[in-house]
Image: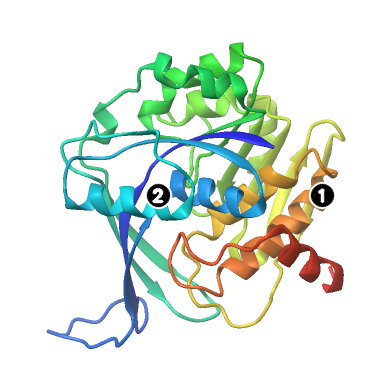
Amino acid sequence: MKLFVSGLINVETNLRIRSFPVTYYPIDYPFFGIQSTVSGAGFNIANATRTLGDDVSFVSLIGKDAEAARITETLDKSCVGRDMVFNSLETTPVSVILYEQGAGGRRQIYCDLKDIQDKTIDPELVKSAIDAADTCVLCNINFNRSLLSIAKRAGKTIATDVHVLNNIYDPFNRDFMSYADILFLSDEDLPVSPRDFLLTLKTEYAPKIIVIGLGSDGAIMYDREADAITQLPAVHLGAVVNTVGAGDALFSAFIHYYGRCNAVEALKRAEVFAALKIKCDGGSAGFSSEAQVEEVYKSYEF
């Protein structure tokens, strides 16, 4: 499948902590507990779907600094490509993530977007890639707003993840929810139960698929074609190292499998993909091939 993926890429530092809340002490020595990598939702999705075998065109914005040089080197090595990664920012975005290792998988993210929310992308620079794609994955970041209508007019399936949401009329995310054919979000910070929020979303907006990730409790999905809600428990495959990027993994794998099998089977495989991913450290690490997913899927008792 040909994918157009547009979203954030940044330098991410993961710090393993003892527990939440963090107790003050002047210094700690978490040996091998600090990892710095290239990550960001856009890159994670592009990298994950590329690993699953999709043909990916990736779009993002970076700066003109040392972090940008590190990102371009990583892109060259990853085969994601950087033909449409533009050096139009003053400084490259960075993030710091505190995570508590263990079954709970709690994490706290600090994301410094620098000046990226003030920037746009000239649609003419990416229109041919949109036209060539089967699905356009447009992450909820400002520079993608102008691309939503272009992808819709081109008749493309639009997929987006709005992450944390507590208001269905949220002004920042409303454009993305209005255009989405495939809509993902997390259950964190929901004002009501995930099922009730799902019912409200499907009435207010018109996605074909809505999935709410429930963390260690799995995921709940509305399929408009079947007019059905399905809730799946999480797939557990042993010790959890770091849950950062689990939502990106679930979203990426669902996009890859949706259309090749029914929505429920696509979500099951996506849960396997996410469960394999969180056995590794860092948002952009731990992505499995389609063959690896199928091997686990066939043996797992859902």
Tag 1, which secondary structure?
helix
Residue 122 lies, in percent from the top left, at: 35, 17
Is residue 159 shown above or below 10? above
- Residue located 61% across and 23% down the image: 132
Q: CA distance from mark 2 to mark 1?
A: 33 Å
Relative to 46, 51 lies left or right: right
Q: Quadrant of the N terminus?
A: top right
Is residue 262 shown above or below 293? above
Q: Residues within 10 Å of mark 2 (few under 14, many from 20)?
A: some
Tag 2, which secondary structure?
helix
Q: Mark 2: which amino acid? A: Leu
Q: Is residue 159 visible?
A: yes
Of circles 2 and 1, the one toward us is 2
Disc 2 target residue: 75
Q: Quadrant of residue 3?
A: top right
Return the mark for residue 264.
1
